[in-house]
Amino acid sequence: MKISRMLLFVTATVLSLSMAATGALAGWEPERFAAESTLEIMTVDAEGGEHWFPIWLVVVDGDVFIRLGNRAADRVAANTRSPIVSVRIAGEEFGSVQALATPGMADAVGDAMAEKYFSDLFIRILPHPMTMRLVPVVRQAAAPPTTAVR
């Protein structure tokens, strides 16, 4: 019985460390999301109101990126949980995702958007002040209390 608990503890610790090291989060699979047209982001305003809105996405070099127009950029800038947003994609919801500004990726993301979405031909001429990479927050599980093994 004691060996089983020790084995369980070691397995849980290794899995936790492995997920933290790789940034893996169950269900967060950018390559699978590449086939999706949109995702939804939820921000929280100063009054605590939640607002979900759809936005196009692309996957570039294995990461999920979005490009925000003025209105969406204003919502994200006013988000009281910043840089955390919630994301719904491919029938799943992720409650804690970092929306990280990546201005250096604006051209690559713009090119990927143009390739993926035909109507980007018209949308691209509008201002897009924010390009962001979405990165799920991986929380390390608290280590179980240590017990002496005899």
Image (cartoon, grey):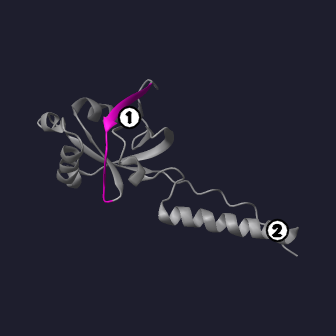
Amino acid type at mark 2: Ser
Residue at left offset 45%, top offset 40%:
90
Residue at left offset 71%, top offset 69%:
10
Residue 93: x and y in percent read: 50, 39
Tell whether position 69 is magenta. Answer: no
Please name the residue that numbered disc 1 is placed on: 79
Residue 25: x and y in percent read: 52, 54
Indicate whether 28 appears above or below 44.
Answer: below
In the displayed structure image, the side of residue 72 where residue 96 appears, left or right: right
Closer-to-camera residue (14/43): 14
| Residue at the left extreme, as displayed | 125
> Can see residue 45?
no
Residue 24: x and y in percent read: 50, 58
In the displayed structure image, the side of residue 89 where residue 57 appears, left or right: left
Residue 125: x and y in percent read: 11, 36
Indicate whether 91 appears above or below 8.
Answer: above
Please name the residue that numbered disc 2 is placed on: 4
Judged by its main secondary structure, the magenta piece is strand
Closer-to-camera residue (21/35): 35
In the displayed structure image, the side of residue 75 where residue 88 appears, left or right: right
Position of the N terminus by quadrant = bottom right
Indicate whether 22 appears above or below 126.
Answer: below
Residues under labels 1 and 2: Cα distance? 46 Å
